[in-house]
Image (cartoon, grey):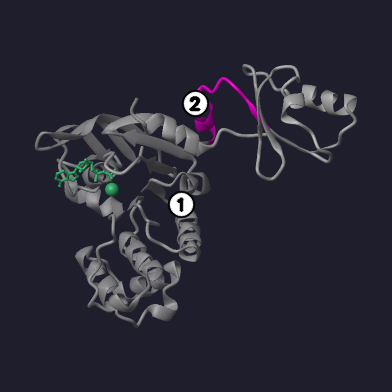
Amino acid sequence: MSISISGVSKLYGEQKALDEVSFEISTGEVVGFLGPNGAGKSTMMKIITCYLPPDGGKAEVCGRNVMEDSIEVRKRVGYLPEHNPLYLDMYVKEFLDFVGGIHKIKNRRDRVNEMIDLVGLGREQHKKIGALSKGYRQRVGLAQAMIHNPEVLILDEPTSGLDPNQLVEIRDLITQIGESKTVMLSTHIMQEVEALCSRVIIINQGNIVADAPTQELQKMTGRKTKTITVEFAQDVTASALAKIENISNVKELPDGSFSLTSNGNVDPRKAISIWAVQNDVLILTLREDEVSLEDVFKQLTTSK
Ligand code: ADP
Ligand code: MG
């Protein structure tokens, strides 16, 4: 087990940021840690990386307790903190060499060059960090997190504030890293989890509200209806469609197609096809809408 969290709590004064949180992450997993702002993601990550002590419960990384064995934990964990704090006046190589020194890495120069290659900083390696774009700064952050070859990587919102191209590049890099390491990354972007993570843990107000393989999450809404999008080659009226068996609601969409909601959890596609044949109209599109992960997230993290 790479990460084992059991009943961990954290208080900031009166405020409970984490309320007896428990979960485990196995070696090699890439897990998304998802939650709205203020949910407790960064706090949990600071505890795992020994930046903050828990007020209760037990946190272990690679079988070592963050309180009793913090140096051993730090050797095994790479951490990219939220907002990626870097020394902007340092040169890329100088900074990585400095971090390598903290970790007492042997053959530091070689290792720094290896990291520069790995994260794709070749062309920027002689620049000052302050002169780099945000995407390249993020690469420096990832390089410093991995320079001591840790087993576990904790990435706190690694793609926030990146433009769409940088986003894709950093996601690709994380995918590549995830092939050889245990990764826990926080985000409040659902698509990021879909793109990168095999499992998702959702936290809200200091409590875990879901912990499931990404693909299974969609089933967690307990939605009682199905929604079908259908487009016809001929003009069709909403009132005619409403008469189809098991259809409870019909909405015409701006592009001329229709969104049909079924009564209960039955699939009305067969009935729609039969209706089309009987009425001599041609179906161009007939698609069941998936429950989006966004919906699941909203449902699980909106207080009622
Ligand atoms: P997230 O990373 O999910 O946005 P955080 O772990 O940063 O959430 O914060 C969880 C809660 O704890 C928030 O309500 C936040 O305001 C509060 N909090 C975080 N850090 C501190 C701190 N140093 N002092 C007081 N409150 C804090
Ligand atoms: Mg945070």
Q: Quadrant of residue 261?
A: top right
Q: Amino acid at mark 1?
A: Gly
| Residue 211 in sight from this viewpoint | no
Assign a secondary structure to mark 2: helix
The question of residue 179 being in magenta is answered with no
Q: Which mark is residue 224?
A: none
Q: Is residue 22 left or right of residue 9?
A: right
Mark 1 or 2, nearer chain start: 1
- Ligand 1 in which quarter: top left
Q: Is residue 230 left or right of residue 88?
A: right
Q: Which residue is mark 2?
A: 221
Which range of residues does the magenta coloring cover? 215-228
Q: Which residue is mark 1?
A: 178
Residue appearing at x 30%, y 42% in the figure? 62
Between residue 287 and residue 219, name the one nearer to us: 287
Q: Is residue 50 above or below residue 112?
A: above
Image spot of residue 64 (x, y percent): 24, 41
Residue appearing at x 24%, y 77% in the figure? 90
